[in-house]
Image (spheres, rainbow, N blue to C red):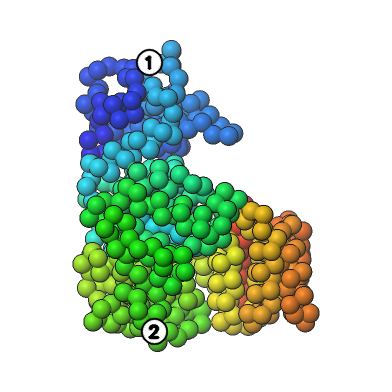
Amino acid sequence: MKNLTLRNLTEVCSGTWHGDDALLDCEVSAITTDSRKIEKDCLFVPIVGERVDAHRFIPDVMAKGALATLSERELSDADYPYIQITSSLQAVKDIAEFYLQQLQLPVIGITGSVGKTSTKEVIASVLKEKYRTLKTQGNFNNELGLPLTVFRLREDDQIAVLEMGISDFGEMTRLTRIAKPDTCVITNIGTCHLENLGDRDGVLKAKTEIFRSMQPSGHIVLNGDDDKLATVEGYHGVKPVFFGLDAKRDVYADQIVSRGLKGVSCRIHMGEDAFDVLVPTPGIHMVYNALAAAAVGRIYGLTIEEIKRGIESLETIRGRFKMIETENFLVVDDCYNANPMSMKASLDVLHDGEGRRVAILGDMGELGENEISLHEEVGEHAAKCGIDVCICVGELSLHIAEAARKADPDFEVHYEKDRESLLKNLGGYVRKGDTILVKASHFMKFEEVVDALEKM
């Protein structure tokens, strides 16, 4: 890894070297926090977690061929090289910041309340048409995940698309200090993490911290149809590029036609240029994601043809509106996470499904003092959006069920107290030919529901 010698690592971490000085100019081959993924000449970073202190794995990983390890404590009996540091987590962040500086490649940072991952996927799909592109995988978007994503970069990578997720003030400032994005993309300002951020104005304040370490020559790409983001006038002379469905936006879409669960077609306009495209994932929110990707593609010099090809070649991932066809059902796996905005958007897409349209909805977390009313909003929307059945699961989702019944007494609503109870009774709720949406916050572990439907 470029310039990641043990000497530089010791200095970057403000650490103390313990070992043979002859090793100090050796570069590490990789950096990992997972003792099961040791490769020759890597650096091991032991994280102290709530359940496991990874320092206990140090002798084993060194025996497997690691070049060195970090350690938050002195290892008096060590016969291997290590760097003693104060905090493994802080060291990881310091190393990632230094490593990105060595690579000198463009970074696109993506945040927002809803749609970070799907927007990241479309942007990466577009940029790969011209550049060797690395993107965040899975949920590696926090103060540990972002550095681990950075460590996957190599010298032949040409551009990085990094998702940046937060739940409190100050987190984005720390993330953007690592990433120093050249382009900042914000998808929207919704009702996420209200326990810590208070209200949507608090969310806006926290998300726009992404600008603080932006490169001076950078770019800002914002959803201009979001009432909060529309108030952003710029940052240190950088004016936003706004995207949306309004023809006044810098990048906008019209002629939008739903193609059912096959996706949505539209015409995208960028200045004097325009092109027709099929976004291969359903939902109006995917049009917004495609617009963000088109704006970023234009910034990085892609042609109209490359942008169109990148959007149309998008591949979905599990847990993020992944379509799974089984012998009996079409399962829409959207169970990675949920909040009121994304829940209602997914229900709107389910409306376009074939057969009975069944929503299996679970609790939404981190909504603060308004969590009951926000669940009730989803229930009312479910009753009115034109689907056939709603199955509500969890303590908070009781409020979804009650609000749905109140909004439409004829609407078919079922309630189960928890995931285990649902799994016992699931076969009685679904029928062959159903289109089934599965959505909840991650802690509900609804991937087990998806697995059960696949096996029916």
- Report the front residue among 78 and 302: 302
Q: Nearer the viewer, mark 2 or mark 1?
A: 2
Give residue 160's quadrant in the image. bottom left
According to the picture, the residue beneath numbered tag 2 turns out to be 254
According to the picture, the residue beneath numbered tag 1 turns out to be 79
Q: Is residue 447 visible?
A: no
- What residue type is disc 2 on? Asp
Is 134 positioned to the left or the right of 170 in the image? left
Is 294 positioned to the left or the right of 194 in the image? left
Q: Give the x, y percent position of residue 124.
A: 34, 62
Give residue 51's quadrant in the image. top right
Q: Give the x, y percent position of residue 269.
A: 31, 80
Residue drawn where x is 34% and y is 43% of the image:
178
Q: Label 1, secondary structure: give it.
A: loop
Up/down of 204 relative to 378, above or below: above
Q: Is residue 408 visible?
A: yes
Cα–Cα span, label 2 and label 1: 66 Å
Q: Give the x, y percent position of residue 365.
A: 62, 54
Up/down of 122 relative to 433, above or below: above
Looking at the image, which residue sits at the far top?
A: 76
**Neighbour tally class for label 1: few under 14, some 14-19, many 20 plus, Cα within 10 Å:** few
Residue drawn where x is 53% and y is 60% of the image:
200
